[in-house]
């Protein structure tokens, strides 16, 4: 006997949607996953043929697996138990806190995004803002780095553009994993940064449990051979001078290093400099105790106004790039060789005080090597010359003559000078033009250049980038 069954329209629509979801889950999604996985594997194979430092297995490990590895790490578990006992909480609560820290720290590296999208974006951004140059590279030293070593690029920190610039210039060498501060933990920036292989750190955290999770991640990545890039200064320079190193990450690397059987750690000093640092005025404001503090909304507004002004200049054909951005790659330093030369042996066997002394010496050595390869650019030369001249005006010819004398002093100390196009006259004119466009310099009717007194701090900021190189 046949009967007609009526069902509500909403139920029919819901059943149809669920059927489509089930069909997609069983037929379409596996096919899409296979296609994407096949495409990603092709990218990885191509990269491993091209890169000097191939992608390590740990780099390609699923993020959840890395998080689980941290959760069950014996040292992390012991730290969680101590934390639970100290704060009189259940062990499960401490382990849940460990999981939150691990998810905050561990990156989600995507090779396709890094080398196909991230590289393209970094290249376009860097080259649209600056004339990007590699001034000096110790090619022989870099070629001698063992292929199985963990390479750590150690850099001075002048601008947030440092991340973009070095990632772009080192893209034919390796996929770099950066340590990024909490400033970048905003949507959608943090998702993009994680996909680029970076990991987040709380620079001023005093939580021993958090520090242990971070330490074990850094040590796991280092043992797995992940190429890394660190800024020992721990933050942007505010006055243009190089800062003393903070030793937290270096201590993590050193305290787990096996000098006999472990993978060697090789530090590559990288010097970065700009004709113009986009954040220079905001950085200098932080040194002025009387300056009004700017909130996040006001900072975003300032950035948008800056971008708008430059966009209007570009549309009118009156926009210039912000001079030169130059990167130098110095002579690598093997941690194993350094420990042998110092007679330090295995730092894992030292007490805290002895290990700290060795790590401090290592930090000083690395910062010395980084400082030695910081490029000398036109604005730094012009700044130093005009500051030395004081209130006296200088003609263009006098500026060039004094810059030439300054270059000779710097070269006597082994500094790396970048002369644009190999033409010093052109380079000095570039530096003068950069400051003239910003009204930091004025030129009188007699053709003499003088620094505006109100902007002397800006000139000192750029002169400070090379002050450590002066004999």
Image: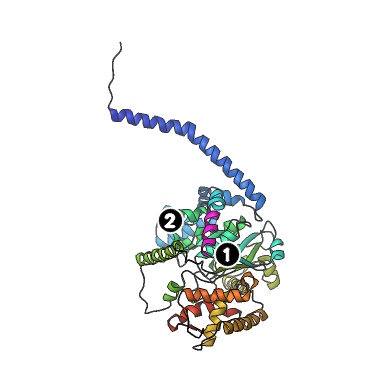
Which stretch appears magenta? 118-129
Disc number placed over residue 97 in the picture, else none:
2
Q: Which colour style is shown? A: rainbow
**Which one is in front, 359 or 72?**
359
Question: Which one is nearer the viewer's eye here, 297 or 72?
Answer: 297
Residue 399 locus on image (x, y percent)? 57, 82
Q: Which residue occupies the extreme top position in the image?
A: 1
Q: Viewed as shown, does residue 289 lie left or right of 365?
A: left
In front of the other: 297 or 30: 297
Residue 471 appears anywhere in the view: no
Q: Residues within 10 Å of mark 1 (few under 14, many from 20)?
A: some
Q: Residue at x 55, y 52 (%)?
A: 114
Question: Is 309 included in the stretch rendered in magenta?
Answer: no
In-image side of 405 versus 450 (left or right) = right
Where residue 70 sits in the image (x, y, percent)? Answer: 52, 54
Q: What label does residue 180 carry, if any?
A: none
Residue 147 x %, y %: 69, 57
| Residue contact between numbered discs 1 and 2, judged by CB atoms under 8 Å | no
Instruction: Kindly state the secondary structure of the residue where label 1 is placed.
Output: strand
Q: Is residue 192 visible?
A: yes
Q: For the stretch drawn in magenta, what is the main secondary structure?
A: helix
Secondary structure of the residue carrying tag 2 is helix
Q: Is residue 124 magenta-colored? A: yes
- Which residue lies under the disc numbered 1? 132
Whichever of labels 1 and 2 marks the residue nearer the N terminus, that label is 2
Q: Nearer the viewer, residue 255 or 436?
A: 436
Graded by Cα atoms within 10 Å as few (under 14), some (14 to 19) or many (20 or more), the crowding at tag 2 reads some
User: Would residue 9 appear left or right of 316 to someone viewing this image?
Assistant: left
Q: Nearer the viewer, mark 1 or mark 2?
A: 1
Residue 340 position within the rendered picture, expressed as x and y whole percent measured from the top left: 70, 69
What's the CA distance linking mark 1 and mark 2?
43 Å
């Amino acid at each position: 006997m046949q009967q007609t069954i009526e069902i509500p329209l909403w139920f029919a629509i819901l059943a149809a949607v669920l059927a489509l979801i089930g069909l997609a889950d069983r037929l379409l999604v596996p096919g899409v996953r296979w296609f994407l996985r096949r495409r990603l594997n092709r990218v990885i194979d191509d990269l491993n043929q091209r890169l000097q430092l191939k992608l390590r297995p740990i780099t390609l490990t699923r993020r959840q697996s890395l998080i689980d590895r941290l959760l069950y790490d014996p040292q992390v578990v012991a730290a969680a138990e101590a934390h639970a006992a100290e704060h009189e909480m259940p062990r499960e609560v401490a382990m849940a806190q460990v999981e939150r820290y691990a998810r905050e720290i561990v990156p989600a590296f995507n090779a396709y995004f890094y080398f196909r999208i991230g590289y393209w974006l970094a290249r376009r951004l860097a080259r649209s803002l600056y004339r990007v140059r590699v001034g000096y590279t110790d090619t022989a030293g870099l070629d001698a780095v063992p292929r199985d070593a963990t390479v750590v690029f150690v850099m001075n920190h002048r601008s947030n553009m440092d991340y973009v610039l070095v990632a772009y210039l080192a893209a034919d060498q390796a996929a770099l994993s950066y340590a990024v501060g909490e400033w970048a933990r905003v949507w959608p920036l943090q998702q993009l940064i994680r996909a680029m292989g970076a990991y987040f750190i709380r620079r001023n955290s005093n939580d021993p449990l958090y520090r242990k999770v971070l330490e074990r991640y850094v040590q796991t990545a280092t043992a797995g051979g992940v190429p890394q890039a660190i800024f020992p200064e721990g933050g942007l320079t505010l006055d243009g001078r190089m800062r003393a190193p903070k030793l937290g990450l270096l201590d993590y690397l050193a305290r787990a290093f096996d000098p006999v059987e472990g993978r060697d750690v090789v530090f590559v000093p990288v010097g970065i400099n700009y004709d113009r640092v986009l954040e220079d005025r905001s950085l200098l404001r932080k040194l002025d105790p009387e300056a009004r503090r700017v909130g996040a909304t006001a900072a975003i507004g300032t950035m948008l106004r800056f971008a708008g002004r430059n966009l209007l200049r570009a549309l009118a054909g009156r926009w210039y790039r912000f001079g030169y951005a130059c990167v130098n790659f110095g002579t690598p330093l093997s941690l194993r060789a350094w420990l042998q030369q110092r007679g330090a042996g295995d730092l894992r066997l030292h007490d805290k005080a002895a290990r700290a002394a060795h790590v401090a010496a290592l930090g000083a050595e690395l910062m010395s090597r980084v400082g030695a390869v910081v490029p000398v650019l036109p604005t730094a030369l012009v700044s130093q010359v005009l500051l030395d001249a004081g209130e006296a005006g200088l003609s263009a010819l006098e500026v060039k003559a004094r810059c030439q004398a300054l270059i000779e002093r710097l070269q006597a100390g082994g500094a790396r000078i970048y002369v644009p196009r190999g033409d010093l006259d052109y380079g000095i004119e570039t530096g003068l033009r950069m400051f003239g466009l910003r009204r930091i310099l004025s030129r009188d009717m007699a053709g003499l250049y003088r620094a505006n007194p109100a902007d002397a701090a800006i000139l000192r900021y750029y002169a400070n980038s090379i002050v450590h190189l002066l004999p």
